[in-house]
Amino acid sequence: METFKDAAKANKGKMLYSYSDVSDGIQQRLAEFMGITEDALPTLRAIVPAGMKKYISDTKPADLTVDIITKFVDDVLAGKIAPSLKSEPIPEKNDEPVKVIVWKAIRRYCEGPNQGCIRQVLRSMVRTLQEARRPMG
């Protein structure tokens, strides 16, 4: 925890620093929002409000230093780290007529000649999800 506090002081003004548990109340809601489960703790994450993009440090918590945390923050702010996406891995083989589209590869399928078809499918999925959330009655 001291390393985290020292990094926050060293990088004051670059990013807002916070630490949290995941057990209850606002902490639990924050963890859900960030995609953090108890088995993932401890972890170093960042969120950039513009676009609500979330980032995960690959460094093991035991290996974190002020310099490593500073580099992580600088790289997030400079756009050198890709945001973390809730997605299945990109399939190694995807050459069948019906494609498996995962979030990490969505741009590959939504740009170009098939974009209208894919967008229509996505709109249909969104409508279906919205209808499923409506209260019965």
Image (cartoon, grey):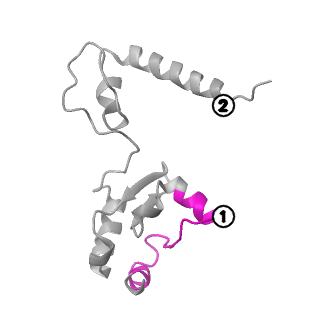
Residue named by callout 1:
25
Density class for disc 2 (Cα within 10 Å; few <14, some 14-19, many ≥20) is: few
Say which residue appears at 65% left-offset and 24% top-offset. Answer: 131
Say if the magenta span includes residue 8: yes
Judged from this view, the residue extending furthest toward the front is 39
Name the secondary structure under disc 2: helix
Magenta segment: does it hold 127? no
Residue 31: give x, y in percent of width and height. Answer: 53, 59
Q: Nearer the viewer, residue 52 or 50?
A: 52
The part of the image, by quadrant, that contains residue 23 is bottom right
Q: Residues within 10 Å of mark 1 (few under 14, many from 20)?
A: few
User: Could you tell me which residue is drawn at 52 percent across and 18 percent down?
Assistant: 124
Q: Is residue 91 above or below residue 78?
A: above
The CA span between labels 1 and 2 is 23 Å
Would you identify the image quadrant in which residue 57 lies?
A: bottom left
Of the numbered discs in the image, which one, if any, rests on residue 116?
none
Q: Amino acid at mark 1?
A: Gly
Q: Are marks 1 and 2 in contact (CB under 8 Å)?
A: no
Task: Please provide the residue range marked out in magenta.
Answer: 4-31
Q: Which residue is mark 2?
A: 133
Tag 1's secondary structure?
Answer: helix
The correct choice, above or below, for 11 with respect to 53 in the image is below
In the rendered view of the protein, which quadrant contains the N terminus?
bottom left
Which of 55 and 43 lies nearest the eye of the viewer? 43
Q: Amino acid at mark 2?
A: Arg
At horizontal 41% and vertical 44% (from top left) the residue drawn is 86
Q: Earlier in the sequence, mark 1 or mark 2?
A: 1
Residue shown at 30%/15% (left/top)? 98
Eyeballing the image, is 137 above or below 10? above
How many marks the image carries: the answer is 2
Q: Is residue 99 left or right of residue 86?
A: left
Measuring from the top left, give residue 70's x and y in whole percent.
32, 74
